[in-house]
Amino acid sequence: MMKTQLLSMSPEELGVYLKELGQPAFRAKQVFAWLHQGVPFAQMSNLPKALRETLSERCLDNPVQVLETITSKLDGTIKLLYRLHDGHVIEGVLMRYKYGNTLCVSTQVGCRMGCAFCASTLDGCARSLTPGEILGQIVCANGVLAPQEQKVGNVVLMGSGEPFDNYDNVVKFLRLLRMEGGLCIGMRSVSLSTCGLVPNMRRFALEELPVTLSLSLHAPNDAVRKRLMPVANAYTIEETLDACRYYIEKTGRRVIFEYALVHGINASPEQAVELAARLRGMQCHVNLIPLNSVPERGLTGVSEREVDAFRKTLEQHNISVTRRREMGDDIEGACGQLRRRYLREQDEQ
Ligand code: SAH
């Protein structure tokens, strides 16, 4: 029998579930708090023993478990490998900044968007994660940080998977994330990255979940974008930027454009000029990402000089731009790489 994932439930849903077990209404709040603190059923000390036992039999407290952690010697970044209750493996990255800890979470097991430079998509998408499985990654990371008396303060939905290809679960996760009595992480501390599924971008603008939206743009025009991202065959850049403008209008938040520089494809000075012209007048910021080369994909990154030249050209055209700091370069920081190594090793055994 599949165990019930309590971490996916809102306090109201928990209340209904516990009522069916004959429990009074106030239990929901207690269980919700324990679950989000990462406390196992056996240690939920204000619950009757019989209830703790019933819950252990029928439910999962956290559907995610840490399988392995690898800490970067360069900057303290921690790469996490998790196991889901059904045996699937996902990964995440915990970045340690002076101002706090940021966790990069996955929203799917793999991805089906097919971007040419991305390791997550190489084997397709096995399945989407439940709200509790997305939340459970944060609960796990808090456990890893507990000995240092720290917690996750910021969350980025930039791990494996396309958040808007798992829309309902991601939205529910965000609503749970900010709840009082739970993790209490506000939407201003959250970034969501999408490859640009336009209808769901527009839908999301109306959810009143004002996260920082990042769009994986990666190209100054549709022809170049189609070479890198299959999603460009479904939506034009203009349609996608319109959805961004709509998001800015509805939420008052600026949009971040991610742009991974790929040698010989999207990184020339002329393409920087073209990009600047496209983005003129938008309340936005460009984040240049030096490509993390994925050998399976045969694409290579650019030199430091090329990154600099691209950045300067954008600046000259009054586009706000930064170069993303690389974190955990020694520990396979790029999405999907660690999981792939792990699965390969399992195969070899
Ligand atoms: N599905 C979401 C989240 C993906 S990962 C999206 O497409 O936005 C977050 C960012 O990392 C995306 O901008 C993605 O395009 C980028 N990315 C993926 N693989 C990369 C690589 N090998 N090098 C640099 N950036 C990469």
Image (cartoon, rainbow, N blue to C red):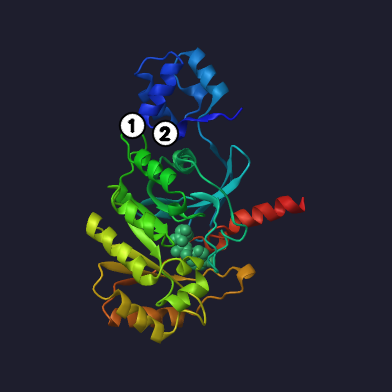
* Disc 1 target residue: 181
Q: Which residue is at 46% across, 73% downward?
A: 225
Report, in whole angstroms, how far the alpha carbon at label 2 lies from the one at label 1: 8 Å
* Amino acid beneath label 1: Gly
Q: Is residue 346 left or right of residue 27?
A: right
Q: Name the residue rendered at 36%, 29% in the picture.
A: 11
Q: Quadrant of residue 337?
A: bottom right
Q: Amino acid at mark 2?
A: His
Percent position of residue 223, x then y = 46, 78
* Closer to the camera in the image, 279 or 180: 279
* Residue 316 as seen in the image, left or right of residue 59: left
- Residue 281 sits above or below residue 73 on the image: below
Image x and y of residue 81, in percent: 57, 48
Q: Is residue 168 above or below residue 288?
A: above
Quadrant of residue 87 within the rendered picture? top right
Q: Earlier in the sequence, mark 2 or mark 1?
A: 2
Q: Is mark 2 within 8 Å of ligand 1?
A: no
The mark found on residue 36 in the picture is 2
Q: Is residue 201 visible?
A: yes
Q: Quadrant of the N terminus?
A: top right
Residue 153, image x and y in percent? 36, 47
For the point 41% across and 77% down, which residue is it?
A: 221
